[in-house]
Amino acid sequence: METHYSVQGMKCGGCIAKATEALAKLPGYEGAEFDLKSGTAVVRGAIEANAVIRALTDAGYPAGVRSG
């Protein structure tokens, strides 16, 4: 399963590493791809959207599910 998110505040590879580390702690996480330019993320796995949003926001990157 893939879910698309908008993510704020990510500016570099270090941000991606920090966000990936936060997501990796979630049960069901399989992987993620971040696009710094567009401020988006695609997260793969059997993971609840609210858990992803909470993990990213707690890591310092406010997130929300992207519609459309």
Image: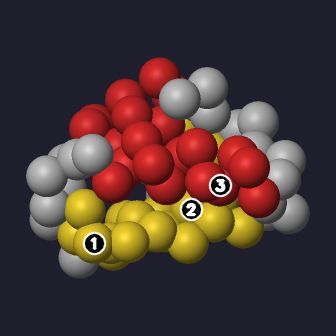
Q: CA distance from mark 2 to mark 1?
A: 13 Å
Name the amino acid, label 1. Answer: Glu
Q: Are marks 2 and 1 in contact (CB under 8 Å)?
A: no
Q: Is residue 17 above or below residue 29?
A: above
The amino acid at mark 2 is Ala
Q: Secondary structure at mark 2?
A: strand
Mark 3 — residue? 16
The colour scheme used to paint the residues is secondary structure
Mark 3 / mark 1, whichever is N-terminal: 3
Q: Which residue is mark 2?
A: 41
Question: Which residue sits at x=72%, y=67%?
Answer: 35
Question: For mark 3, does the 10 Å Cα neighbourhood hold few (<14), some (14 to 19), or many (20 or more) residues?
Answer: some
- Which of the 4 image quadrants contains residue 55? top left
Q: Say if 5 sits above or below 25 in the image.
A: below
Counting residues from the N terminus, which is met first, the one under dot 2 or under dot 3?
A: 3
Q: Say which residue appears at 61% left-offset and 26% top-offset.
A: 60
Q: Residue at (33%, 54%) from the top-left corner?
A: 24
Q: Residue at x 14, y 52 (%)?
A: 27
Q: Residue under circle 1?
A: 30
Q: Of marks 2 and 1, which one's residue comes earlier in the chain?
A: 1
What whole-number distance in Å separates the C-alpha atoms at marks 3 and 1?
Answer: 15 Å
Question: Which amino acid, mark 3?
Answer: Ile
Q: Is residue 47 left or right of residue 32?
A: left
Residue 21 percent across, percent down from the top left: 45, 48
In the depicted view, which residue is nearer to us: 4 or 51?
A: 51
Badge nearest the viewer, 2 or 3: 3
Residue 65, image x, y percentages: 45, 49
Between marks 2 and 3, how big is the CA–CA gap? 10 Å
